[in-house]
Amino acid sequence: MGSLTENVSVARLSADSICLNRGNASVDGSPLVPPIAQSTTFQRTGVGSDPKHQYSRVSNPSVTTLEQTLGALEDAPPAVCFGTGLAAETALFLSILRAGDHVVCGRGVYGGTTRLLQQLLSDLDISTTFVDSTNLEEIRSSIRPNTELLFIETPANPTLALTDIQACARIASDHGVILAVDNTFLTPILQRPLDHGADISVYSTTKFIDGHSVALGGSLVSKHTELLERVRFIRKCTGAIQSPFNGWLTTNGVKTLPLRIRAQSASAEHIAQRLSELSGISRVFHPSLAEGNDAAIANRQHLDGHGAVVSFEIEGGYEAACTFVESLRLCTLVEHVGSVETLITHPASMTHADVPTAQRESAGITDGLLRLSVGLEPTHELLSDIELALALASQSPCPQTEEAVHA
């Protein structure tokens, strides 16, 4: 009789197990929590030796542990981690694009992505066409002979519009274009873009992956090893690697990611449903409310929930939104999502303030739109807080001027 491992096939580890156990050494006396390698450089045994880690601008053990975890969550090689999500996007663009190239980008993406493409890469003779990524014909008709990248975010930020990753992957493949998907809102726990044909998953690990608002970071995940090598080279050249301490913090934060995001997603679904029943709110956005083709996309792409972000539009526009936000007690006004605390954002004056007004409004980001990142507080308490603030917003105008908030 053979050994157990010879006779029993070993099942693929679940995402929950990967988050908890990745990086734990199987050596007697190993620490349960991987230690921080808070060092800029590493000793060599002699001239000509080639240690795994040499200088922390290139690689670091604490960052490598996180990279192994994030790659494993999508059945991919180790991810490439960066100091911020925008640093990850910058490296991605520099690794793929050259002067004269063209990008097709969804309108519903993070405002910093739009700023990077419009105000920085445009100076390098890289052009971008922004499209409604839910409209496949618009994507297809926007691709040119010099298009190298299709960049989408689904659910969109902040309207949570859903884009069909599989359909986009087919269009990209037909035209020899790379497809990158910003998966920050759902993480690999609730959506795995590579399984649906995407070439690259993009993350701001600052958000749900870290989950505690303590560590900036970004990552790129792909099954294309040549692309990963190119991205690592760009990171080495630009010095954009994540710090060891932030890598260590994020590795510890990711241990609770499955539990956190599933609970937050379930709470967000209840809140979205209740918001859709309240007067004073004109529109509510959450994938759990999707119908028809959008519901089919959500059910096909999403795993164990539809995410912790809910967006909604207050009747009365800017002034009503201002009063509503100032009346909340449990929801903190910040330019952020993904924390264990419930957070609220006014995208038009915060995350998307640099997006031209016409482009912002065409993406559905009005002055009355608010983005709620649901935390771990009791759902009924959050609903009570929201309903009270909504009642106050319907009664009195905002005491501040629009200029004060935009400042």
Image: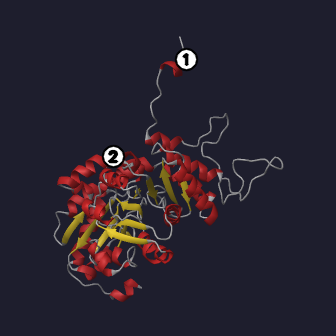
Taking the image as drawn, is residue 346 in sight?
A: no
Q: Earlier in the sequence, mark 2 or mark 1?
A: 1
In this view, which residue lies farthest toward the top?
Answer: 1
User: Residue 152 in the image: x percent, y percent?
Assistant: 36, 61
Q: Is residue 183 left or right of residue 166?
A: right
Given the current orientation, which residue lies at the most extreme front position? 145
Q: Is residue 369 left or right of residue 14?
A: left
Instruction: Name the side, left or right, on which 72 lies relative to 364.
Output: right
The 10 Å Cα crowd at callout 2, few under 14, some 14 to 19, many 20 or more, is: some
Query: On the image, numbered disc 2 is attached to which residue?
Result: 303
- Residue 364 lies in quadrant: bottom left
Compared with residue 144, is residue 224 higher up or lower down, i.e. above or below? Answer: above
Q: How far across and how far down the image is residue 220, in percent?
A: 49, 55
Q: Which residue is mark 1?
A: 3
**Residue 46 image point, x, y percent:** 83, 48
Q: Residue at x 24, y 71 (%)?
A: 313
Above or below 335: residue 214: above
- Residue 26 figure quarter: top right
Give the camera-side residue of 80 and 137: 137
**Is disc 1 surrounded by few (<14), some (14 to 19) or many (20+) residues within 10 Å?**
few
* For residue 130, above or below residue 400: above
Of residues 381 and 129, which is closer to you in this image?
A: 129
Q: Tell me how the rendering is colored.
A: secondary structure
Q: Secondary structure at mark 2?
A: loop
